[in-house]
Image (cartoon, helix red, strand yellow):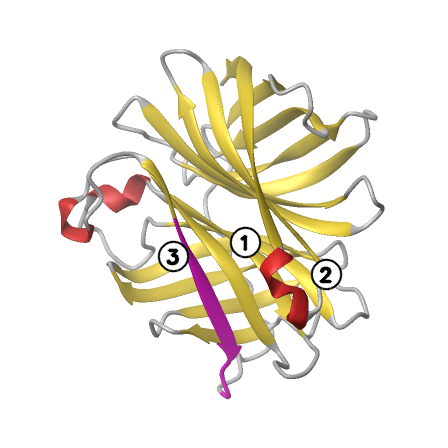
Amino acid sequence: MNMNLVGKWGNQYGSVLEIHDCDADGSFRGIYRSDTGASGIYPMNGYAHGGTGASQPISLSVFWRPTDSQVFDPSWHWMSVMTGTLFLDEPITGQQQLLHGLVASSLHEAVDIYGPGIYTESLTFSPLSERLPGGQSFAFGTAENKVSVEWLNACPDSPFRALSYTYDDAGLVTGALTQQDLTSVRVQGFTDPNPRERLQSIALTALVTDRNGRACAIGMGGFIDRQSNTAKIERFSSSAVSYTNRYSGVAVTHERFAVTSSLL
């Protein structure tokens, strides 16, 4: 377990990221509490590289369908992907700086969203003194009505060849990302299980090794076009940069996938 991550983290808006557990493979789960734009408790999961250096790459996904409310608004169909670095070196010790991509698939004038898009902002999370009680475990979704999806990458220069995953009736995604050398890495995240519009939002995370042999956390956020069976995804990649080089901590790359199958 990566004890540098487990606990409560607050950002500049007063939102709280609660990481309840972190497994040996770097995957973690928890909840996100927000009072900005949308208010509620939301499911969250992601990956972080638990190295011993002065910083650790991290990426997480949030599904903006609250677990504590049945009052519908358009953001129930949205995701977020947040990717960046947990800095453990001076002058900022124990602070997460993440590039946030809000994957908004529908209009929502109440928060000035007038068209589908990925809306970005930098968020800073600092540890909160309040600690989480031990032994917490949260599960979202069920094993019912699982859908399987397979994608082929249409970008010839991408390090990734294909993506396959399943999602359940609560939008929880688990699967694998196949690299060009045919090795695969695990992915997890969320997708909208009941899209009302043409676009189905999705947000995924994984841990990979880049072409230079560095460990990277990646977040993939974007839309599946259900009419054309294609997907347009922005890939956020972070590596273990020092705090003084934080401007180079996250790179954004465009990916295009073709959905080759979708089976109940």
* Above or below 142: residue 227: above
Q: What stretch of residues is rendered in magenta?
A: 120-129
Quadrant showing the N terminus: bottom right
Q: Which mark is residue 87?
A: none
Q: Which residue is mark 2?
A: 240
Residue 29 lies left or right of residue 90; in this view the side is left
Magenta stretch: helix, strand or loop mostly: strand
- Between the C-alphas of marks 1 and 2, the distance is 16 Å
Q: Nearer the viewer, mark 3 or mark 2?
A: 2
* Above or below 169: residue 6: below
- Between the C-alphas of marks 1 and 3, the distance is 12 Å
Amino acid at pointer 2? Ala
Residue 140 lies left or right of residue 75; in this view the side is right
Q: Few, some or many C-alpha atoms within 10 Å of disc 1 (few <14, some 14-19, many ≥20)? A: many
Residue 230 image offset from top left, x and y in percent? 47, 17
* Above or below 95: residue 225: above
Seen at 79% across and 65% down, the residue is: 51
Seen at 61% across and 72% down, the residue is: 6
Q: Which residue is mark 3?
A: 42
Residue 211 lies left or right of residue 4; in this view the side is right
Amino acid at pointer 3? Tyr
Q: Which residue is mark 1?
A: 60
Whether 122 is among the magenta residues is yes
Is residue 11 in sight in this rendering? yes
Question: In the structure shown, which secondary structural element does the residue marked by tag 1 occupy?
Answer: strand
Of residues 242 and 235, which is closer to you in this image? 242
Residue 141 image offset from top left, x and y in percent? 45, 44
Q: Nearer the viewer, mark 1 or mark 3?
A: 1
Residue 67 image offset from top left, x and y in percent? 34, 55
